[in-house]
Amino acid sequence: MPEDSDGPHGLDIVYVADFYGDALFAESADAKLAADKCRAVANSATWGEFRQAWPDSDFEWLEGRFESNPPDDAEFSRSDVPPVGEGFPEDPWLPDVVVDWFPEDLIEKYGGKVGFTDGGYHLGLPGKHAHDIAAELCARGNIVEESVDDIPEWISYYYGEIDPRVGRARAAQPASPLG
């Protein structure tokens, strides 16, 4: 990835403008991988469907949860997989991986902050500036689009349903998960 003092260039970036008041940016590939994992768990009726939908062949994170691997025709439920923090492979965690590439000058310019929780680093950017930030990332040679599926899917899985009228997650969490 070519990078200079004003940040990365040539990335394919997606974002949502309102993630509990913050903007959430991600590389498209990270957003797709994270959302595909969520879709595999949320949309599979059988273990065969789950294994086929899971975006990679790594199932080590499931070892020890069952005496033997469930057969493909066995019923699958979201409760069959461990929750976040208890073994579920949440990588890439979108608010964390964005910290690795997001331009520091834009974080500063728009009043963003990088925080740390027990889950890792996270980037919080004011949602009211999302479109301006996206325009600046575009001006630096990146492809930037609002995410209509992958990031909202990821948010819905972890934080609650997205209200498509306003792009806001409807969940019982009053504060931003980004800190």
Image (tube, helix red, strand yellow):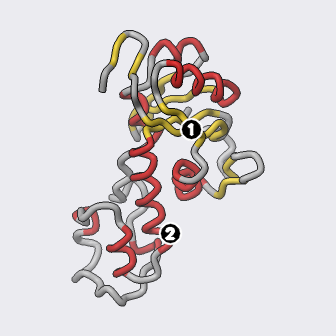
Query: Mark 2 falls on what kind of element?
Result: helix
Q: Is residue 7 left or right of residue 155?
A: left
Q: Is residue 155 left or right of residue 26?
A: right
Q: Is residue 63 above or below residue 171?
A: below
Provide residue 11's location: percent of width, then percent of height.
41, 31
Q: State how many labels appear.
A: 2
As shown in the figure, which amino acid type bears the numbered disc 2? Answer: Ala
Tell me the residue that label 2 is attached to: 42
Q: Is residue 105 left or right of residue 47?
A: right
Query: Mark 1 falls on what kind of element?
Result: strand
> From the viewer's perspective, is the residue at label 1 or at label 2 nearer?
1
Provide residue 56's location: percent of width, then percent of height.
28, 61
Q: How far apart are labels 1 and 2 at the CA level?
A: 25 Å
Tell me the residue that label 1 is attached to: 145
Provide residue 61's location: percent of width, then percent of height.
27, 62
Between discs 1 and 2, the one toward the N terminus: 2
Could you tell me which quadrant the C terminus lies in?
A: top right
Q: Estimate how packed mark 2 is, as few (under 14), some (14 to 19) or many (20 or more) residues with alpha carbons within 10 Å.
A: some
Q: Quadrant of residue 73?
A: bottom left
Say the numbered circle drawn on residue 30: none
Q: Is residue 160 above or below residue 27?
A: below
Could you tell me which quadrant the N terminus lies in?
A: top left
As shown in the figure, which amino acid type bears the numbered disc 1? Answer: Glu
Instruction: Identify the residue at image location x=38%, y=26%.
Output: 101
Q: Is residue 115 above or below residue 33?
A: above
Q: Is residue 153 left or right of residue 174?
A: left
Provide residue 44's location: percent of width, then percent of height.
45, 76
